[in-house]
Image (spheres, rainbow, N blue to C red):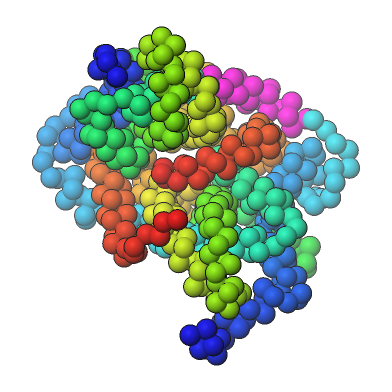
Amino acid sequence: MKDEGKLRLTFWENLQQSIFSSKLGMILVYVVLISWSMTTIFPLAWVFLNSFKQSDEIISNTFSLPSDPTLDNYINAFETVNIGKSYINSFIISGSVVILVLALGGLAAFAMARMNFKLRGVLQTLLVASLLIPSFATIVPVYRMMIGMELVNTHAALIIPQTAGNLPFAILVISGYMATIPKELEEAAVMDGCNRLKMFTKVFLPISLPSFATVGTFVFLWSYNDLFSSLVLVSQEKVAPIVVLLSNVSSQYGTDYGLMTAAIAMTIIPVLIFYLFAQKTFEKGATSGAVKG
Amino acid sequence: MKGDRLYAVLFLAPAFLIAGMFLYYPFFENLLQSFYKTDGFFNSTFIGFDNYIRLFSDETARVATLNSLELIVYVTIFQVGFALVLAIMVDAIRRGAGFFRTAFFFPIVISGAAIGLMFTLIYNYRNGLLNEILVSLGLERVLWLTEQSSLYMVAIPTVWNYVGFYFVILLTAIQKIPNDFYEAAKLEGITGPQKMFKLTIPLILSDLKTCIVLAITGTLKIFELVYIITRGGPGDSSEVLGTYMYQKAFEDTAMGYGATIAVLIVVLGLLLAFITNKLLKRDEVTY
């Protein structure tokens, strides 16, 4: 069988063989990998570089290092479009969503993972099914409800539906993690006289912290980056998060290159720093987040 | 455990109350509203299937649906395809794997709005990155966003944005394959390319399937990039279902009709996920 297999190498397989076993092939592999990483790094570097130039220098000399580095574009971003305010709004909204999702989702996940009750199976199915609900499919009624409650253009208008939308994902991931914790720990906690609430705060919460971190980072990202719901529910300048500001900049200041590059840089920098520090958590989120689209 | 019933209710109630009010109820309400005609904010009249009839004769809706489907094809092939190639390559190399992991994954953390704005700058006719490269090579400027090209120009950042996501999923899957498999294969004389086609790919097939389903449902949710880069234009050449739904419901305040388009998005998503699952049905390998 094995000899047969060897004889029957197709052209494509031969090519593959030479790619992965020869020195030349290895060089080719690195060339491909380096080229793709160039496509991710180069555009960003270009934006960062240009954000320190005057607009006319961006136009005349877009690839060179800034001849006279300036913070004008950043100052401009704070003064003309009030990017500081959008920052604060973004952090209020996304921060609240993360806290609410982790608190409510954590409790529910504990019940789903460690308690037996009649509706457990039904709720589990419901949670999985709700991952298929896109925000397009809830936004019209949510918008009307928010108008009814006079919450449109307040932070709560975005915090509440984003919390609701992220809860199923959080409950599924955290309860999946909690389900793997040995039963002995639960029994030991009972012996020590813990009730269910104490068991959660003293035993299960600390042990499950990695899953809380994973869920927290991803929920933060989804919330921070969610332009669609933000445009509908919190588009007024006093409450608008930074992605709405970006979209306004693109339509109103489309010729002010300096301002645009500075605005992009300022949106990206916090998440990029966050990412470089918590890379493992992010990647774990991607693989566990494989349940959500 | 005794007394669990009370605690279960107490622990579950807050989460499911919020999800019920702001996720499940709106979802069903959206279905209802797709049978209403709304002008302004609170005037609704029941019109039966009229919105659906309108949807099927709406030329822009047809274009948007076809564009969304076209995007799904490109995005699935290139996102998952590139990701698979890159994952196999990174798994094969010894040095620099950590760097490539970081470099490939990080675009995911950037918001679609920022990427959209960045690509606007890249595509710009005057002083855009692409045209400046052309000029510095002594070539003519090109108008990148035309009616023929706009959909591709939106597909590129979409693919670019998410390759890293599938790359990490697939790389993790490949590295999870136990070493014994490879050792057994080695004894059988299976190496290099054969190893890849007969061992690696079949073993990560279920992860590949997950990636494909995610790519399909994810592409149906595209909004930011199209909204920022082209606003669906020029004309409606790059309109997709997400942007068209937004335009109808919130710019033209035809909320009932917007709700109908949202129903179409959900139905398409379910249908495509179902079909993919059927087509890629295989016995799952567990180890």
In this view, A70 is above or below A185: below
**What residue lies at 29% left-to-right and 35% top-to-bottom?**
A124
In depth, the one of B200 and A52 nearer the eye is: B200
At x 78% / y 50%, what residue is drawn?
Answer: A62
Q: Is residue B140 visible?
A: no
A83 falls in the magenta region: yes
Q: Quadrant of residue B82?
A: bottom right
Residue B209 x/y as whole percent:
40, 58
Q: Which region is colored magenta?
A: A72-95
By secondary structure, the bulk of the magenta-drawn segment is best described as: helix
Asked if residue A196 lies left or right of residue A246, the reply is left
Residue B254 screen position, x and y as percent? 27, 37
Residue at the spot 89% in from the left edge and 42% down from the top edge: A67
Image quarter where the C terminus of chain B lies is bottom left
**Is residue A38 part of the magenta span, yes or no?**
no
Q: Position of residue B183 (x, y in %)?
A: 58, 67
Q: Quadrant of residue A157?
A: top left
Which of the two residues, A6 or B11, is positioned nearer the viewer here?
A6
In the image, A189 versus B175, the foreground residue is: A189
Kindly identify the residue that appears in the image at 74 percent across and 46 percent down: A45
- Most extreme residue toward the right is A67
Residue A258 in view in this figure = yes
Percent position of residue B187, x then y: 58, 74
How many numbered circles are shown?
Answer: 0
Q: Looking at the picture, does residue B273 appear above or below residue A113?
A: below
